[in-house]
Amino acid sequence: MHKFENLAKRVIVAIVAIPVIILCSLLGGYYFFALITLISTMSLYEFYKLAENKGIKPLKLVGIITGILINCTFVSQRMQSDILGKIFNTDLTLNFLYPQFQLFTIILIEFVLLVLIVELFRKQGSPIINGSVTLAGVIVISLCLSTLIGLRESFSYAFTTQSSFSTYLLKREYFEDVDKLSGWTIASIFITIWICDTAAYFGGIRYGKHKLLKSVSPKKTWEGAGFGFVFAILAMVIMKLVVLSYLSWVNSVIIGALIGFFGQIGDLVESRFKRDAKVKDSSSLIPGHGGVYDRFDSLIYISPIVYLYINLIVLA
């Protein structure tokens, strides 16, 4: 009975959350930035709470503020263009903007130095472990999720700077629809993750016999993982047919495979953290799902991989 009650809660939350996530993905801009920043901030907070269960004392406030600033760097071109454009009452080109990588580097260096200075005078736990976990949380969660913001933003610049993608857009008369392509690319990533998780869950229940990694996640099976992997590929192929016509068949299959494989790796990584911290969920914030980190652990691991593949291969 408890299993079905938990499933009912998961379904209700999904009915409410999925439309919001898809809508923010399609709207893009500051809406999507706000969504990912919220997910990133809550996940990072829960990561630090897991560490505290081990007796570690991470610098939560410093880490969270830095995480938000890193989120901002991936939308920095839009921010600079909007803010400076209004101040100087002119349209700005990329040549007048501070590079995203430069801003990110400055923030990361100052963050590391600040952590070292604070731990120099702090008298709680091990300075090495505290500082390492504080830094790891920002890199593992804030930076990885920020790449999803970067992917949503990159299309606006790709069609003016990347030759092959520009040619495609020119032939397809998609210049006015670049934002739609970007939005549906992000939405497709979410949808593929959800389908992968659902297929792995029910495939494992129905056919699961061989444990995948019993020491980390006793309920996961190779059969369930296989179902998730196959359905992730099918999901991305369907998205290519329906809304992502700019993707080749090969790229749609590869992206689906990346999501199907690394998404489940991300789930296992977080399960390993929770087992080490001796907790079932990262929090109880989302009914039936646990914490925010629990719900988006796959997305955290997938985001930088898909970001790099689309930017370096698809848009190149």
Image (spheres, rainbow, N blue to C red):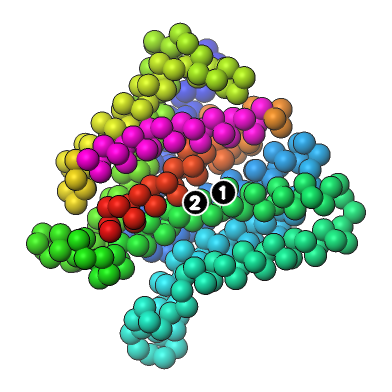
Image point 62% across, 30% down: which residue? 272
Q: Which mark is residue 141?
A: 1
Is residue 263 on the magenta stretch? yes
In the image, residue 233 sits, relative to residue 189, either above or below, namely above
Can residue 194 be seen from the camera position used here?
A: no
**Left or right: residue 246 compared with residue 224:** left
Check disc 2 and report the residue beneath it: 145
Q: Position of residue 292 (x, y in %)?
A: 55, 41
Can residue 277 be seen from the camera position used here?
A: yes
Tags 2 and 1 in contact by the CB under 8 Å rule? Answer: yes
Dominant SS type (magenta): helix
User: Front-most of 126 and 46?
Assistant: 126
Q: Mark 2, residues whose alpha carbon is within 10 Å: few (<14), some, or many (≥20)?
A: many
Which amino acid, by three-letter code, is at mark 2?
Answer: Leu
**CA gap, disc 2 and disc 1:** 6 Å
In the image, residue 26 sits, relative to residue 108, either above or below, namely above
Which amino acid, by three-letter code, is at mark 1?
Answer: Ile
- Secondary element at tag 2: helix
User: Front-most of 250 and 60?
Assistant: 250
Q: Position of residue 37 (x, y in %)?
A: 52, 56
Q: Which residues are magenta?
A: 250-275
**Left or right: residue 220 compared with residue 203:** right
- Secondary element at tag 1: helix
**Left or right: residue 253 compared with residue 101:** left
